[in-house]
Image: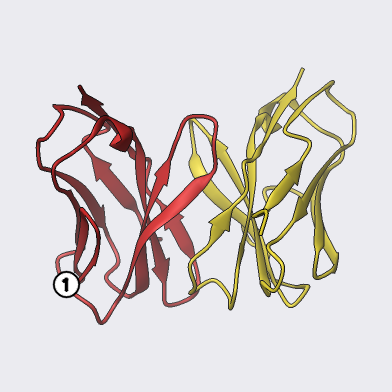
Amino acid sequence: DAGVIQSPRHEVTEMGQEVTLRCKPISGHNSLFWYRQTMMRGLELLIYFNNNVPIDDSGMPEDRFSAKMPNASFSTLKIQPSEPRDSAVYFCASSSVGITDTQYFGPGTRLTVL
Amino acid sequence: KQEVTQIPAALSVPEGENLVLNCSFTDSAIYNLQWFRQDPGKGLTSLLLIQSSQREQTSGRLNASLDKSSGRSTLYIAASQPGDSATYLCAVLNNNNDMRFGAGTRLTVKP
């Protein structure tokens, strides 16, 4: 298996623009997680899905952030409008059976908002 | 709110040395604890997962222990190698499915 795939790997945008990050989980995994990593706050869980359904989005920082999982093989994290403080590395991870199981991380998307 | 602390923030050792990384947490009502490795510019790789009912887990040269009552976990690395150089993070999953990560320990193993 190719592992968790994220795109793009790097994104540079200007404040106010819409940003969409994409993730393809490992085939057969039922759970998908979105994380954000910054120097100041470390690694934070933003939202996770079980069987394409959002289970816990309490980590989503603001209404500017939204995540969808239209099917078992694809998820998006959207920021609209983006702000410089959203600059971070965003990771997607997947697991077989939920948050209690071992998670497999993608390589991340480094987002820079100017 | 669960707080996860890793000390030291950075550690440098000569090759071949045995070493211990520390992780402490404030709320003992945990479901499990994981140790991850993160290489520069890469995602996290899960190393060991310890359930709350377990005391330790081993994988090769790695051994992770868990003392839930005292809020501590250690990751023991035997016979360290330069390839072990990375940042090691611990993550605690609470019984309410809240997952918290420590800030990590950056390990450098010198040849």
Q: Which chain is red?
A: B
Among all residues in the image, which is located at the extreme front?
A1
Seen at 69% across and 33% down, the residue is A86
Q: The C terminus of chain A appears in which quarter of the rendering?
A: top right
Residue under the image location 9 percent in, 36 percent down: B17
Q: How is the image coloured?
A: by chain
Secondary structure under badge 1? loop
Coordinates of residue B78 in the picture (x, y in percent): 14, 47
Chain of the residue where label 1 is placed in the rendered structure: B
Between B8 and B81, which is closer to the camera in this rendering? B81
Q: Quadrant of residue A29?
A: bottom right
Pick whichever, B78 or B30, lies toward us: B78
| Residue reaching furthest to the top | A114
Name the spot of residue B89 as percent of width and height, x first: 37, 47
Front-lying residue, A94 or B83: B83
Residue at screen point 67% across, 29% down: A87
Q: Position of residue A35 (x, y in %)?
A: 61, 50
Indicate whether B88 appears above or below B62.
Answer: above
Answer above or below: position of B111 versus B63: above
Quadrant hosting residue A81: top right
Chain seen in yellow = A
Q: Amino acid at mark 1?
A: Ser
Image position of B2 (left or right of B23): right
Count the numbered circles shown: 1
Name the residue located 39 percent from the left edge and 45 percent from the top edge.
B37
**Front one among A71 and B27:** A71
- According to the picture, the residue beneath numbered tag 1 turns out to be B69
Image quadrant occupied by the N terminus of chain A: bottom right
